[in-house]
Amino acid sequence: MAEAKKTDGTEVITLIPVYPEAGKAPYPIGTKLRVAIETAAFWKARGIARFANDPRENLATVSAGIADRVKHAPLPPAPVMTPPPASMQQAFTPPAA
């Protein structure tokens, strides 16, 4: 069952840095990831990633003509996540069915 989950989903290519977890470095722009179909649709709608197999989106490409003169700055790791202060925490009561 766990191995089936690894192969489910679709491949996307990131358009902006995507942080996998708080405190870890992000996936760089252009990284190919396999994600759930729902996540891929959510990311595509918000401009976070594009579908890897969509030929219409592969038309505009950038050549490596300036790759030898330009270096990407390293992206900082995500900040450590801390819980909100106790004064802001409230008990959550789900709505009655």
Image (cartoon, helix red, strand yellow):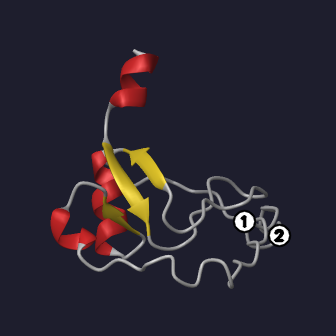
Residue 49 % position (x, y): 39, 66
Q: Amino acid at mark 2?
A: Pro
Residue 42 % position (x, y): 33, 63
Residue at coordinates 76% horizontally, 72% vertically from top-left? 74
Residue at coordinates 77% horizontally, 61% vertically from top-left? 81
Q: Is residue 15 above or below residue 25?
A: below
Q: Where is mark 2, residue-wise?
A: 85
- Residue furthest to the left: 56
Circles 1 and 2 in contact, beta carbons < 8 Å: yes
- Going by the image, does 26 lie left or right of 45? right
* Figure quadrant of residue 56: bottom left
Which element type, helix, strand or loop, lies under badge 1? loop
Q: Amino acid at mark 1?
A: Gln
- Going by the image, does 73 lie left or right of 55? right
Residue at coordinates 82% horizontally, 66% vertically from top-left? 86
Residue at coordinates 43% horizontally, 18% vertically from top-left? 3
Q: Where is mark 1, residue-wise?
A: 89
Residue 52 % position (x, y): 30, 56
Q: Is residue 49 above or below residue 9?
A: below
Q: 95 and 52: which one is in front? A: 52
Which element type, helix, strand or loop, lies under badge 2? loop
